[in-house]
Amino acid sequence: MQAVVILDGRLDTVERPDPVPGDTELLVAVRAAGVNGADLAQSRGAYPAPPGVPADIPGLELAGEVAAIGRRVTRFAVGDRVMALVGGGAQASLATVDETHTLPVPAALSWPEAGGFPEVYATAFDALFSQGGLTLGERVLVSGASGGVGTAAVQLAAAAGAQVTAVVRAAAQREAVAALGASRVIDSSEVAGHGPYDVVLELVGGAGLKVALSALATQGRVLVIGVGGGAELALDLFELMGKRAQVRGSTLRSRTPAEKAAVLAALRAGVLPLLTAGRVRVPVCATFPLDQAQRAYEVFAAPGKLGKVVLVA
Amino acid sequence: MQAVVILDGRLDTVERPDPVPGDTELLVAVRAAGVNGADLAQSRGAYPAPPGVPADIPGLELAGEVAAIGRRVTRFAVGDRVMALVGGGAQASLATVDETHTLPVPAALSWPEAGGFPEVYATAFDALFSQGGLTLGERVLVSGASGGVGTAAVQLAAAAGAQVTAVVRAAAQREAVAALGASRVIDSSEVAGHGPYDVVLELVGGAGLKVALSALATQGRVLVIGVGGGAELALDLFELMGKRAQVRGSTLRSRTPAEKAAVLAALRAGVLPLLTAGRVRVPVCATFPLDQAQRAYEVFAAPGKLGKVVLVA
């Protein structure tokens, strides 16, 4: 197979032996695989792959056709269009995925959309609902709202009847984020003025989080998912007590296979119907073939995009 | 009535008009009222009383006999032995309490024990179980374990089948805390070496919390209840994400009457049977009459005690 590999901090494409599916796994002929923040961090040496996945092939999500199945697979058959969450190794022409980490691809979805769906929607759904308990009428602040997880979160929160305040740095993307369902699209300097917030989904980190905390409502929940802008927070515990607030960190990648299966089951129940009905979508800002992965990562790292950068095979 | 009042940072005793119970309130002839950290902070001007309670009479918990009842009271009668949680005003010879914030006093309990029960047990139960989700076999770290909330937390966690590591500064109190059910009683310098911890109940704050965080288990929960030792925490968000951990702050005092009623209902169901059966108890280290409140607060503020300082009327 052809695979993207990390070599001395750069991305290259090499031939590797085809992987063989285990008993409960599917072999997928990858058609699309999204780029995520964890891939970028891994390519820079900051976020090594967990045990059990290819150490140097990045990629946490993919879509494609089932090419072969393990002997205990019951949910999918050869030829099915699937999308899946993996611990690594998605950015290749072939990948193995556990059937419990896999969903069917709705007919109307393109391959790039499907390949950019699992990681960001699983992350946003798990953070906002499974952990944050976001519910009807609550006020949610989404930082970095124009990115992959951000666009998913804005749409899911709006679909759940929450009031979404979206923080978007690039003025050019404000209108598009509003069209995804945000009640209000603001600059980071306006965060304090539009609180209080019941839930803060923090995708950026850095100084903005301190401001968001000061605008948190009583019993507010802060979910920290991305800290590219800075990973240190000077937390005022007296304020945290007075608000009875909580700050939670989360990441999908390090979870056990059983935990990931639970996340996918929640995604299948909560989000797949919305995706099939066209009520939420996956904005794709650019696609690149596997052998242009280095360029794809550079575009991913640059500000000002809307939605996903996806590799296509 | 006779009441303890805060005057220029000192405590004095004065005569005040007797309070009149509202429709759902009891007038209680106070026999005992515990001293808590919030009283000390209020006496120093750091923690003003919330609206609706006497602004200058401290005291968050009391026990005594029902002297009169409001016209809609259904659960208690004149003469009943009761203990209650209040937003302030407990340190007086008379106090009004809402019947939903009141529990009956088990026959075997002395007045000082009953007067030192509601606030610390409600705080410990709410933090460990309602918020922290502590369950059978989990590992819990309790800082400041020899104080009022600490001794309650050690006993409740042990009763729930958790493994309790208790941090106690005063060597003289280690044996007594072990006798309350702690699996291990340690000095703050030993916290890192005995992790990981599923739940950290932080009653002290300051530098020790940073160490406890580094020893937190995956999906660990930190409950911050007291920060007398320092209210600033430099939180490493990348570590928080990797552990999928959470830091929550909490305080009882600012909650709505309905929220407090829910806490008391949980306490009645979860802890009152243990207290009645003698399986948990209220260690009282010293009692003082109301007119020696200043002295009582000084003893409360000094280190090295086991359990509660209680004012008696």
Image: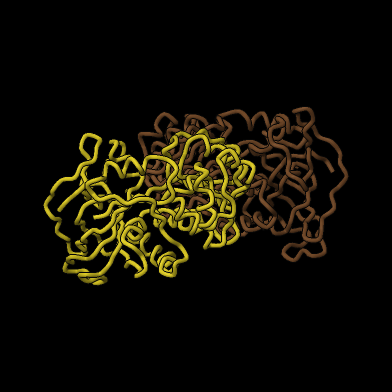
Chain colours: A yellow, B brown
Residue furthest out toward the left? A17
Residue A278 image point, x, y percent: 44, 67
Which residue is found at the position 13% from the left and 49% from the top?
A16
Please state, as top left, top right, bottom left or bottom right, where the N terminus of chain B lies in the image.
Answer: top right
Which residue is found at the position 42% from the left and 33% from the top?
B211
Q: B222 above or below A153? A: above
Q: Work out whether residue A89 or residue B205 is closer to the camera in this orientation and state it.
A: A89
Residue furthest out toward the right? B17
Q: Quadrant of residue B16?
A: top right
Please state, as top left, top right, bottom left or bottom right, where the C terminus of chain B lies in the image.
Answer: top right
Q: Is residue A36 left or right of residue B278?
A: left
Q: Work out whether residue A297 or residue B2 is closer to the camera in this orientation and state it.
A: A297
Q: Quadrant of residue A76?
A: bottom left
Q: A273 above or below A214? A: below
Which residue is found at the position 28% from the left and 36% from the top?
A45
Residue B153 seen in render:
no
Residue B261 image point, x, y percent: 66, 57
Q: Is residue B134 left or right of residue B97?
A: left
Q: Quadrant of residue B112?
A: top right
Q: Is residue A73 left or right of residue B178?
A: left
Residue B97 image point, x, y percent: 75, 53
Q: A113 above or below B297? A: below
Residue A138 seen in render:
yes
Q: Give the tally of numbered discs.
A: 0
Q: Work out whether residue B207 or residue B271 is closer to the camera in this orientation and state it.
A: B207
Residue B85 image point, x, y percent: 68, 50
